Amino acid sequence: MANRNSLTAGIRAASLLLAFSWLAAGQLPSPAGRLETLKTKGLDAEVMVLPVRLGDRTMSEVGEVVAMSLEHGGMRKVDWTTQAFSRSGEATFQQMSTAFGDYVRGSAITTEYTLYAEFLGTPGAGVAEIRGLLVDKGGNPVWSYRQTPEDEEFKKMRPREPMQCIVMLVNALRDPLSLQDPFGPNAFEGRLTERWAKRTGLPTSGERAALQKALETARTRLAGSKLVVFPTLIGGRPDRKQAVHLADMLNDQKLGKAEVATVQPAIEIQNVLNEQQRLWQMARAIREYLRQKPAAADYAVLADYAFAPDGKAFTVHFVVCDHSGEWVIVDFQNDHFPDFQAMELKSGDDCDRLVTKRLDRFLRTGANGGQE
């Protein structure tokens, strides 16, 4: 944000004088009045999303996902910034709210509203509190949200990672902003989504069409074809023993004639917070590898599993390519999806069972493997 130069100080002083004049006249909008104004604007409200605080640090990437989720709900005047509101040490919700209001009043933010959130906790203990605060351009609170382990919604969701916190926060904003379902199959995709897709490597419409065509071909061929299974990535590290288990499961389920690759593909995947970005990094990396070194099989499989500190899986990704690297299946699974929810995933072997189940679904249903 801009420094507190003389111009900003002058604007702030003028704003304070105006606020005092309204207060003297009894015309200062009440919190309820500010919320009603927000509801009247609804999807047309202009909102800037700041970096989200995770524990004791702020992360602009999380703020970006919040902003995109609001856009998916139908908002066209939402944006995000990398410039963060920072505070030191612990703070009560009220202390945080007061400090944030002061920050916005003294900043160069020009949007009608500014959204800030905190997901507090530690990696070992998990999420302890979720906070959300929306203020107007004068720093006045318009909407707030707070969830702790004592609250029913928190108990129901039992958030363990940032995406679950984002879902809770954004769902809480659906009423005041008149959002459509931000996480449904018909979510709106605007400029933020397009910008993010280009940066994270999401497939183009042409790549998606080619992927669908390749899957339709594989549905009649893959079960009788030779598959090579690359060492599974667990926490980013290749695990050949896990690949042996996955190959055995594929053979048992007659999902191809699988064997483990004799070489480890030289691919590198960045450890990023965004799950979709990680998935498509992996998909592009294995595609490029096979284009340079075609598999000695009809198809190749690479899986990637990530686990939370409590030992439970929170992402299960896998990619199937043909022997020259062209995508056949690129699948994304976390606890927002029914197949993932239906299984208790506490080990690599459990994740292998999910991959086998998902592969079978793709071959039977095509498209997105029956996933909505």
Image: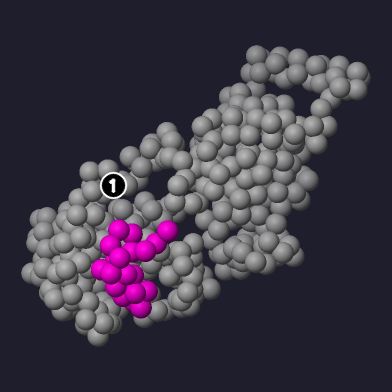
Question: Which one is nearer the viewer's eye here, 279 or 362?
Answer: 362
Is 110 above or below relative to 360?
Answer: above
* Residue named by callout 1: 203
Q: Residue 369 in magenta? A: yes
Q: On the image, which quarter does residue 190 sit in?
A: top left
Q: Position of residue 62 (x, y in %)?
A: 51, 47
Q: Is residue 364 left or right of residue 116?
A: left
Q: Residue 38 in magenta? A: no
Residue at the (66%, 18%) spot, across then down:
8
Q: Position of residue 295 (x, y in %)?
A: 11, 66
Q: Residues within 10 Å of mark 1 (few under 14, many from 20)?
A: some
Residue at the (22%, 54%) spot, across then down:
211
Q: Position of residue 106 (x, y in %)?
A: 68, 26
The answer to whether any part of residue 205 appears in the image is yes
Secondary structure under tag 1 reads loop
Residue at the (38%, 56%) spot, across then down:
271
For the N terminus, which image quadrant? top right
For the C terminus, which image quadrant? bottom left
Q: Is residue 252 left or right of residue 102?
A: left
Residue at the (54%, 35%) spot, across then down:
75
Number of numbered discs: 1
Span shown in magenta: 352-372
Q: Position of residue 138 (x, y in %)?
A: 72, 26
Q: Is residue 10 left or right of residue 70?
A: right
Residue type (three-letter) at the residue carrying disc 1? Pro
